[in-house]
Amino acid sequence: KYHVLLPSVEEIGSPLDFLHWNALLKSVSALNAYKQMYGKIDPGNIVEYLVLNAFFPRSILFCLINAENCLHEISDAKRGYTNLAEKEIGNLRADLEFADINDVFEFGLHEYLDKLQGRINDISTAVYEQYFKIRPNLMDQSQSQ
């Protein structure tokens, strides 16, 4: 909701802008850890920290790495992928590992996060299809005839 909360370009870098970035960090319990790592509040550093940091436990990349490891544990895959869910999460993880914060802002932060959310939704669907969707048991049907 950043574009709603800060309605004009002139307010970028203003005290209101600073407050919003501060509130975002607080909302994910990241303010102290962020300040230890970067010091001052900077939008580029905040986005990098919350999206692309492989070591901050609430960053998107950190969560994807752990989710991918869990999928590999379930399928007993040693490397690569054995199903669509593993393939999609691996592709997204790799994209985030090699992403550059400048490219994110050049693409547009809002647009980048929308696209990222869409890809995460696709992974969720693939996980559902692979592990949770109830399929008809053809063995039971053929045995009952």
Image: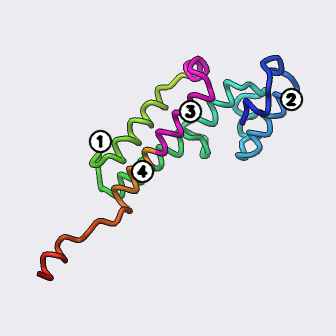
Q: Which amino acid does label 2 sit on?
A: Leu
Q: Is residue 6 magenta?
A: no
Question: Nearer the N terminus, badge 3 or badge 4?
Answer: 3
What is the number of the mark on residue 16? 2
What is the number of the mark on residue 125? 4
Left or right relative to 91: residue 101: right
What is the number of the mark on residue 126? none
Q: What residue type is labelled 1?
A: Gly
Residue under the point 61% across and 45% down: 58
Question: The N terminus is located in which quarter?
Answer: top right
Residue under the point 70% across and 46% down: 28
Q: What residue type is labelled 3?
A: Leu
What is the number of the mark on residue 52? 3
Q: What residue type is labelled 4?
A: Thr
Residue under the point 57% across and 40% down: 55
Mark 4 Cα-neighbour bin, 10 Å: few <14, some 14–19, many ≥20: some
Left or right relative to 116: residue 37: right
- Quarter of the image for residue 10 reads top right
Q: Mark 1 or mark 2, which is nearer to you?
A: 2
> CB atoms at circles 4 and 1 under 8 Å apart?
no
Mark 3 Cα-neighbour bin, 10 Å: few <14, some 14–19, many ≥20: many
